[in-house]
Structures are given as C-alpha cells and as structure tokens.
Amino acid sequence: MRAVDSGTLQTLIVALIVTAAALFVAARWYRTLASAKRKNDKGCAGGCDCSTDG
Amino acid sequence: MHRLGRSGASLTDRIDSVVLHRVAGPLIFVVLMALVFQSVFTWAEPLMTLVEEAITGLADTVGSLLPPGDLRSLVVDGVFAGVGSVLVFLPQIAILFLFIGFLEDTGYMARAAFIMDRFMRGVGLHGRSFIPMLSGYACAVPGIMAARTIENPKDRLATIMVVPLMSCSARIPIYTLLIGTFIPPIAIAGIFNLQGLTLLVMYLLGTVTALAVAAIFKTTLLRGPSRPMIMELPPYRLPNLRSLALSVSHRAGMFLRKAGTIILALSILLWALASYPKHTPASSVPAEIAQEEQLANSFLGRAGQAIEPLVQPLGYDWKIGVSILSSFAAREVFVATMGTIYGVGEADETSATLQDQLRAERNPETGAPVYTPLVAVGLMVFYVYAMMCMSTNAIVVRETGGGWRGAKWAGFQFAWMLALAYGAAFLVYRVGLALGLGV
C-alpha cells in the first residue's frame, strides 16, 4: 500500500469535515422548512426551543 | 386595578403604589432596565476576558500541535475564530438572564406587564400580546408560539408581525461586540454609562417600533377593537436561588447548544468559502498582503464584492456585507463570520481579539478606519429591525396558517422588516455624516 503524504491526508480530513458540516446545515434547514409546511395544529406542550432549529 | 383579599395596605400594596404609579411606574421601569443593561457590560467584562483568554490559549495550543496547512487553518481560523468569537458573549447572556430571572421571581415582571398594557392598548394590541412580546426578548420563536393564546385572529396576526422586533438574545453578541468596541464607557449622570445606555436604546428602539408598527397594522390591514387584559399581580417575594440558577443555566445551555451545532457547522462552511479557491500570490508580495488577496479572491470574498454596491450606501465594506448575508441563517453568525474573515485574513499566527482587529481595520485606499462609532450604530440599528433568522421565518409560516398562505405572511414580514432595517441604517449613517459624526 502506498503511503499517503501529510498534505494529502490534511486535504482529505478537511474535505470530510467540510462535507459533514454542509450535510448538517442542509439537514437542519430541511427540517426547519419541513416544519414550516405543517399547519398550526399542535400546542406548545413539548416546549418551544428555538435553539434546535438553527 | 382591583385588590383581592383583606383590606388595609400590605407591603406589596405600598410598593405597588409607587411602582405602578402612572408617571413614576414607567420611569422606574426604564431606570431599572438601564441598570440591568449597564451591569451586562460592567459585570461581564472580567468573565468575558477569562473566556476570551481560554479560547485563544486553546486555539494557540491546538494550532501548535498541528502541522501548517489547511487542517490547522480550519481548526484555528474556522472553528476557534468563528465559534470562539460567539462564545465569548456567554457571560453577557448569563448575566442578562440572571437579572431578568431575578425581576420575574420577585414579582416585578408582572408589574412591568401591567405598565406596558397601557401602551399596548393605546396602539390597539390585545393585552395578551404582552407575553409573546416579552418572550420575544429571549427568542422570537417561543414568542410567536405564545401568540396562540390570543383568540382573535387579527390581534394574533398583528402580534406575530411585530414580535421579531423585540431584541432577542441572538442580537446580544452583535450589540455587545459593537458597543464594547466602538462606544466609550463614559459615565453619565454619575450612575449610568454610555455603553449600557446604548444597549438600552437598542432594546427601546425595537420595542417602540414594534408598538408603532402594531398601531399601523391595527388601523389598516388588521383593523379591529382592542381588548383589555385581566391578570393577577402576585405579591412581592424574595427570589428563589434554585429557580434563578435553573433559568440561567437553561438559557446558557441553549446558547452553547446553538454555538456547538449550527454555528460550528456554519463556521466550518464559511472558513471553506473564505479559503478556496487557492490564490497564488506573486513571490515578492508580503505575507499580510498575500492573505488579504487570498481572502478577496475566495468564494466568500467574491460574493462580498458582488454585494458591496448594495451595502456601500450604509457605510459598510464587503466584509460587513458578506457577514450580514451569512447571518440570514441566524444573527449570531454575523459575529462568527467576522471572526472567520479576520482569522483567515490574518497573516501571523497570533490571535488578536476580534475587537482589536476591528479597531485596527483601515480602508486600503484612503487609510481611514473602516469601522467608526457611526458605522457601528448604523449596523446595530440594521440588526434591531432586520429579520435575520430562518427559524423565525419558518415558525411564522406555520403559525399564520402554513403552506402558501403562511409563506405569504412570512414573506411580507421579511420584506417590510428588511426594508425598514435598510432605510433606518441608511438614515442613521447619512444623517450622522451630515452632522460630522463619521469619524
């Protein structure tokens, strides 16, 4: 197996971290937009915590 | 006001005769709030320095363990500079909510509701609108949800339309960054200082505008009679330390959770946008200029320069413009973006604080400071009015009927708030310049 140099490894790790962050943000926004589509038919009994929506 | 129970004046009655007085009541309320906001600055300063030192120390240690390259830049300039610049405001948020919790526990907040009810009825809002508006000081999302208790759809809609004007906790990092950096701590009337009063003015500006806009809605689009509020005023009591601690830790926990999730993820993305594509400078260019060129040629820099003509009339450069653009997701991201931009744009590895970097920033063409107190005040006014929160947009869609109908109301709210923010920031900057305050 060929050894991977430090620069390539760093680039790979950075690419992974940035992709994970992009997916996280996309999932959050999808969830926020999906919740907007729902009609106002539920109460606030579960708590109204805005910090989870981003 | 009706008194229940035994006759004769109790201690609560005697305090209420002063605190709820027609003239003295609102004055006491404003003075109390001024003292609270002032404490946010004076009490938080040493704690803020501690958090700042801990974050820069950690950033330097982690940075020294990693080899030079993109990964180190991501960790130091992206994660630590971005999330760290938001985290340093944790003491301010904790202290503000400690005081608000204290006032709630003593029973004073119910009196504040009573005092405000008079103003709310004056603009045609339902008395019950006070609770959503009060919740809006913490976060507009529970505030808008709390409007469900208002039965009349027009009153409810008018309340939802103005709740986001109440300065929520997400604005605190922006206000305190700009006030702490550009407003001097000058003593006023012996007990107040200019920094605390500036913060109070920002909160009052949002509240007064909310009442004025509600009055416009209630006499035009959402016309209808106002209804009185019936509420019971609890007796005054000593605050419960346990419930105070719980309330502060809940707010601090929410702030930390947001910083550790969405703001962290957005900081990483912003770092990537500020670091790529890679620009190769000429060999003779000094490191500092090379870093600036890299930033200006990055995706973020290009986007910033594309929107610069839009923000230039407000006195902003492309760095502020792109920070505003990124904060459409959530307001705190403004501070995180500034942290990342100045982190990436920094040539050396020392971690100067964001405040020092903002003070030192110069226009490359004129050599004049980019950030003046006038620009800072204009920027704060922009954030008082602008609807920069995806969660609030989403909840407005849902709470105004959902689907296309809700989207129309949310779009309308977003548009008028943005127009108001832009117009007010423009006015502040231009009038300030005309008065010779632009230095």
Image (tube, coloured by chain):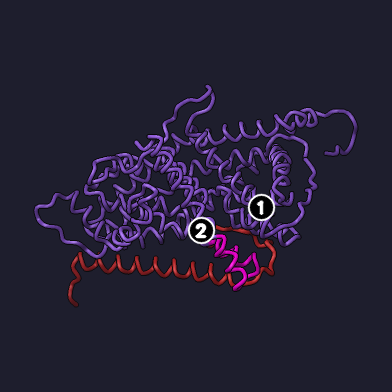
Chain colours: A red, B purple
Query: Residue B280: x and y, percent?
Result: 16, 61
Question: Which residue is farthest left?
Answer: B284
Residue nearest the viewer, comparing B305 with B397: B305
**Residue type for callout 2:** Cys
Query: Residue B32: x and y, percent?
Result: 62, 32
- SS at mark 1 in the image: helix
Q: Is residue B293 left or right of residue B113?
A: left
Residue nearest the viewer, comparing B333 with B222: B222
Residue at the spot of label 2:
B389
The quarter of the rendered structure image containing the N terminus of chain B is top right
- SS at mark 2 in the image: loop
The reply to the same-chain question for discs 2 and 1 is yes
Chain letter for the residue marked with disc 2 in the picture: B
Q: Is residue B280 left or right of residue A19?
A: left
Residue at the spot of label 1:
B132
- Looking at the magenta stretch, what is its main secondary structure? helix
Circle 1 Cα neighbour tier, 10 Å, few/some/many (<14 / 14–19 / ≥20):
many
Identity of the residue drawn at 19% across and 48% down: B288
Query: Residue B66: x and y, percent?
Result: 25, 55
- Asked whether residue B408 is drawn in magenta, I would say yes
Q: Quadrant of residue B78?
A: bottom left
- Asked whether residue B88 is drawn in magenta, I would say no
Query: Residue B236: x and y, percent?
Result: 74, 35
Chain letter for the residue marked with disc 1 in the picture: B
Q: Which residues are magenta?
A: B391-413
